[in-house]
Amino acid sequence: MIEKALRGSKKYWLWLAFLASIIFIGFLCYLKQWKVGLGITGMSRDVSWGFYIANFTFLVGVAAGAVMIVLPYYWHNYKEYGKITVLGEFLAVAAVLMCMLFIFVDLGQPMRALNVLRYPTPHSVFFFDACVLSGYLLLNILCGWTVLHSEYKGTKYPSWLKPFIYLAILWAPSIHIVTAFIYQGLPGRHFWLTAVMAPRFLASAFCAGPAFIIIAALLLKRVANFDPGKKAIEALSKTVAYAFIINVLLFFFELFTSFYSGIPSHKAPIKYLFVGLHGHAEWVPFMWAAAILAAVAIILLVIPATRKNEATLVLGCIAVFLACWIDKGIGLIVGGYTPTPFETITVYRPTLPEIGIALGVWALGFFVLSVLYKITIEVKKSKELVVKYNGILFKK
Amino acid sequence: MAIKRRDFLKLGGLTLVGTAASAAVENLLIKGEAKAEGYTSAPESLKGKRWAFVIDVKKCKENQSTCGFKCIEACNAYHNIPNIPDPKKEIKWIWKDNFEHAFPEESTNKYLVEKLEGIPFILLCNHCENPPCVRVCPTRATFKREDGIVMMDYHRCIGCRFCMAACPYGARSFNWYDPRKYLSKVNPLYPTRTKGVVEKCTLCYERLADGKVPACVEACPAKAIIFGDLNDPNSEVNKVLEERMAIRRKEELGTGPSVFYLID
């Protein structure tokens, strides 16, 4: 099936070349980091995690979000999702790859990364995270590829795959719960020390992942004549709407706990992020941008007319994706480290090389995703009889 | 005919899986690390079950203009702590700060803040009884020794900085650059570190093995840092803690710090 990715239109190759150039720039920045050290980033003794881990945290959610398509299709026979399950699984593959890369570029001694497997430490959440992420990657490669390959051969997927699919469905929420546990078990970071971290992670995963798939599917409809099916998009958009509302609600619950209790250490990080603290307001515009995007997203996704209209739906999904990226990415990280254990504020700003490396990783993820989606579309197209006559698609 | 792509990929995949599987089986058969057999400490080494510091804050208050903070100087010199100009990337194992920064939870009490104003508080790793940093380290590069010291293995550390996120006291530093570039003088008795690893006070375990007290304890001209074994009822730390009033940082977190501050 790989040969499907080796033949494509000019647009396809231009897109891959564009991504390759960004990967190359990121790689050059990483060479500098390899030589000089993580000092070229904006991280500091007080804010020791930053943009890399922020992107990692967000992308684990996107990877887990695929379950919102896979579960209804395989467990509840929701046939309408038939065309996009593979899109979900391949998104999970690309997203987990990006997660692993973001961890890799964040390590001070990346060549020692396998120490995590050489010296297994069950009481460390990172050890579990390494295991569940690797497992999820393998599961999704296996399930996505096998199902697509069966379609390619014109048959149903083999029965031995079913337990693996079921395992992948159970595994998906677990990867994100484990990621949440990285944060919610640390006694000194009051912004993270909340039981609601795991539910918030799951809620934002279940809206950001499917939102991306909606955007991707509708984009593929436009550029590659791939039709995901109207019912599938409608059902998925409702999932995004509900999951995002729950995510925002959980955030409001956090606000209530912090401000009704009045405990300074609970209020301080939220104040820093949204109104500034001790004269520092670096992240305030970003957090309010996320808030405005969230409001726009909820309006567009709740009103049936705008949810059913493809243009406004895509806008709503972009708003969801960006809002979650800010709030669960850099907002989460900076909030955890500010104020410091000394109740001071150390400002974090990602540097240009840091952003370059991050963009390189994103581009690599998109590269893998594009190749996998190309194969998917070609296989599904070859099974369809499609005629475009006077601009109208006729399908058998 | 040349090998088909599908068969080639199958062969490649099998090779990878086979290599990984054989490595895993080998590791399982050798069952983890070999425990050091027959490890005995030298007769002159200091032995304890629960090392602790008691810092006499009154002495710090009285001597701060003359002591030159020799405790910090001695540690930095002995352990090859690099002098990095950018405060965001600095490395410090022991340092001083005011009461409000050392005890921010108590600092909403304006009367207490006033009483303890202008007094330097010496901060360092607390070598907690229940250390969160040890709990989170994925490789056990930081681990707790039997005598209570929270140790660092600079060779095993992968530089993930999870321990830095976990430490509630901001006691840990990371080598953002190659530290050797920032060393003016190197003490050959202690190793220098490489970039990309976390480091912190390791309670001068290497001096304890030689029968010496930690560098900061020895260097203080006023003997403001008292060092001893909390498990030993006759130790100086136990005696002074029975007589005087002491607090520890962030008690409510349950970490059980081993650094006490005498505030009476």
Image (tube, rainbow, N blue to C red):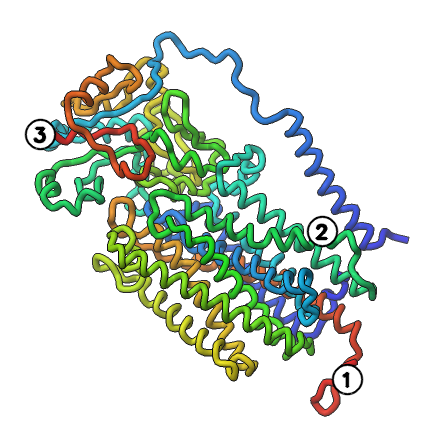
Q: Is residue A98 above or below residue B251?
A: below
Residue A334 spot, x, y in % from top left: 36, 55
Label 1 element class: strand
Chain ID at mark 3: B
Q: Which amino acid does label 1 sit on?
A: Val
Q: Identify residue for label 2.
A: A163
Q: Dot 3 surroundings within 10 Å: few (below 14), some, or many (20 or more)?
A: few
Q: Is residue B189 visible?
A: no
Identify the image quadrant of residue A186: top left
Q: Dot 1 surroundings within 10 Å: few (below 14), some, or many (20 or more)?
A: few
Chain ID at mark 1: A
Residue at left offset 24%, top offset 49%: A344
Q: Is residue A212 above or below residue B14?
A: below
Q: Are marks 1 and 3 on the same chain?
A: no
Residue at left offset 55%, top offset 55%: A98
| B7 lies left or right of B30 | right
Mark 1–mark 2 Cα distance, whole angstroms, equals: 38 Å
Quadrant (top left, top right, bottom left, bottom right) of the C terminus of chain A: bottom right
Q: Is residue B44 above or below residue A357?
A: above
Confirm or deny contact between disc 1 and disc 2 (CB under 8 A).
Answer: no
Residue at left offset 41%, top offset 44%: A185
* In the foreground, B161 or A138: A138
Label of residue A41 in the image: none
Chain ID at mark 2: A
Q: Identify residue for label 1.
A: A387
Q: Is residue A41 visible?
A: yes
* In the foreground, B206 or B25: B25
Mark 1–mark 3 Cα distance, whole angstroms, equals: 91 Å
- Marked residue nearer the N-terminal end (1 or 2): 2
| A92 lies left or right of A328 | right
Residue at left offset 48%, top offset 13%: B39
